[in-house]
Amino acid sequence: MIKDKNQIGLDQFKSIELSAKLNQLLADYQIFYMNVRGFHWNIKGEKFFELHLKFEELYNNLILKIDEIAERVLTLGDTPVHAYSDYLRMSSIKEVKDTGSGNECVAAILDSMKKVLVLQREILLLAAEAEDEGTNALMSDYIREQEKMVWMYNAYLK
């Protein structure tokens, strides 16, 4: 029935479930972003110049994804979470404070990427069930890009 569809023609109930997962992802990305900003500001040591730039590249990438995720939640007809207290409560990624070690920062980045990749794969499955090609495409793009980034950051630690 058409009355069970949201503003873009998707099942309302499946869209609500997708929005909740996307809001969880939004929270993960916000904490991930702030951690990487802190890494950028506080990195020390012989790899300073290399990592300082790499972390800036990463946080710029994350902030774009944050905006895309929030806009996708809105497109699905819901409200994106927008309070840091909610991000801290909802995120599976924890704050990382007071580190300037390149290896610790990269290890934290890899841990965060693993968490968002797992969640993005869950969202991908839900999007397929809801026939939500917009969310599906977004998650597929993120996963493809981040799998390569995981390989690169892992190579740094070897």
Image (cartoon, rainbow, N blue to C red):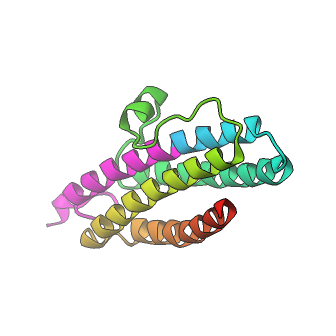
Figure quadrant of the C terminus: bottom right
Measuring from the top left, give residue 141's x and y in whole percent: 52, 71
Q: Is residue 3 magenta?
A: yes
Residue drawn at (57%, 65%), measured in percent from left and top?
150
Rendered location of residue 146, percent (x, y): 55, 65
The part of the chain drawn in magenta is: 1-29
Of residues 124 and 79, the one nearer the viewer is 124
Residue 45 sits in which quadrant? top right
Residue at the farthest left position: 1
Residue 70 appears in the rendering? yes
Q: Is residue 8 visible?
A: no
Please identify the dominant SS of the magenta region: helix
- Looking at the picture, does residue 81 appear above or below residue 19? above
Q: Quadrant of residue 153?
A: bottom right
**Residue at image x 34%, y 62%?**
123
Q: Nearer the viewer, residue 14 or 142?
A: 142
